[in-house]
Image: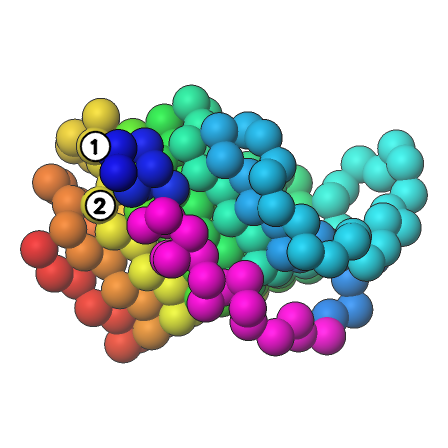
């Protein structure tokens, strides 16, 4: 068995649990599930897209769920979500991408049971909320126009590992900026530099594991 076939079989095995996971009910206007992308080409789709009812020309991405989704072998970032609200990523596997595995910006973003592995840069980037002022004086922050509005973004029960394979330093498992993020019950492991790097206000880190 040649190396490419072995790698394909190995990644297929890793994807098995996520692809077979039950699909959660979600009030999403767009739902994408049970896709698998290899090198930018869709090779498996076991169920059709449930709905695509998002209105055209909408300035903000809202009420979108990506579930049971695999993205592998890309030159750029695996998943990019910008200026978004109420977006859910669940049971995803993102691996072997050239830049960041998952790059998200917005509010009420929920990442649950996502695995990010073998990225060229960091595993995950998260931004949201209003943390324009990082000073300790509330009056000064108010004068600067900062409201300290919480993003309510949550990353939980996810595994980030073997990242920063090309950019070896200052490309952490989680890079964050903003206000009001929660990072809990996650595993960050097997990387050459930092597990978490960020700046912001009112962020919660609980019951995470960092090793190797």
Q: Position of residue 157 (x, y in %)?
A: 39, 70
Q: Is residue 132 left or right of residue 134?
A: right
Which part of the image, by quadrant, shows the N terminus? top left
Could you tell me which residue is drawn at 30 percent across and 54 percent down? 160
Considering the numbered disc 2 on the image, is that residue within a helix, a strand or a loop? loop
Toward the front, the furthest residue is 1
* The stretch drawn in magenta includes residue 12: yes
- Contact check, label 1 and label 2, Cβ < 8 Å: yes
Could you tell me which residue is drawn at 15 percent across and 51 percent down? 190
Could you tell me which residue is drawn at 85 percent across and 38 percent down? 58
Magenta span of residues: 9-25
Considering the numbered disc 1 on the image, is that residue within a helix, a strand or a loop? loop
Instruction: Specify whether residue 143 is in view.
Output: no
Badge 1: how crowded within 10 Å, few (<14), some, or many (20+)?
Answer: some
* The stretch drawn in magenta includes residue 90: no
Q: Position of residue 57 (x, y in %)?
A: 88, 33
172 lies above or below 64: above
Q: Is residue 23 left or right of residue 50?
A: left
**Is the stretch drawn in magenta largely helix, strand or loop?**
helix
Q: Nearer the viewer, residue 17 or 59?
A: 17
Number of labels in the image equals: 2
Residue bearing mark 1: 165
Which part of the image, by quadrant, shows the C terminus? bottom left
Badge 2: how crowded within 10 Å, few (<14), some, or many (20+)?
Answer: many
Q: Position of residue 206 (x, y in %)?
A: 30, 74
Residue bearing mark 2: 162
* Numbered badge on residue 32: none
């Amino acid at each position: 068995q040649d190396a490419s076939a072995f790698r394909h079989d190995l990644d297929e095995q890793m994807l098995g649990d996520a692809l077979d996971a039950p699909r959660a009910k979600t009030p999403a206007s767009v739902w994408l599930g049970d896709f698998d992308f290899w090198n930018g080409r869709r090779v498996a789709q076991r169920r059709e897209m449930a709905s695509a009812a998002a209105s055209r020309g909408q300035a903000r991405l809202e009420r979108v769920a990506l579930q049971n989704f695999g993205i592998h072998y890309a030159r750029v970032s695996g998943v990019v979500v910008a200026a978004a609200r109420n977006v859910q990523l669940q049971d995803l596997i993102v691996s072997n991408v050239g830049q960041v595995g998952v790059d998200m910006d917005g509010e009420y973003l929920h990442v649950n049971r996502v695995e990010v592995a073998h990225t060229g840069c960091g595993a995950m980037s998260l931004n949201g909320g209003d943390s324009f002022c990082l000073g300790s004086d509330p009056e000064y922050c108010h004068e600067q126009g900062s409201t300290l509005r919480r993003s309510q973004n949550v990353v939980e029960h996810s595994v980030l590992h073997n990242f920063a394979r090309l950019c070896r330093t200052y490309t952490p498992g989680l890079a964050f900026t903003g206000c009001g993020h929660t990072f809990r019950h996650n595993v960050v492991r097997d990387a050459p530099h930092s597990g978490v790097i960020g700046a912001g206000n009112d962020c919660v880190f609980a019951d995470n594991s960092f090793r190797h």
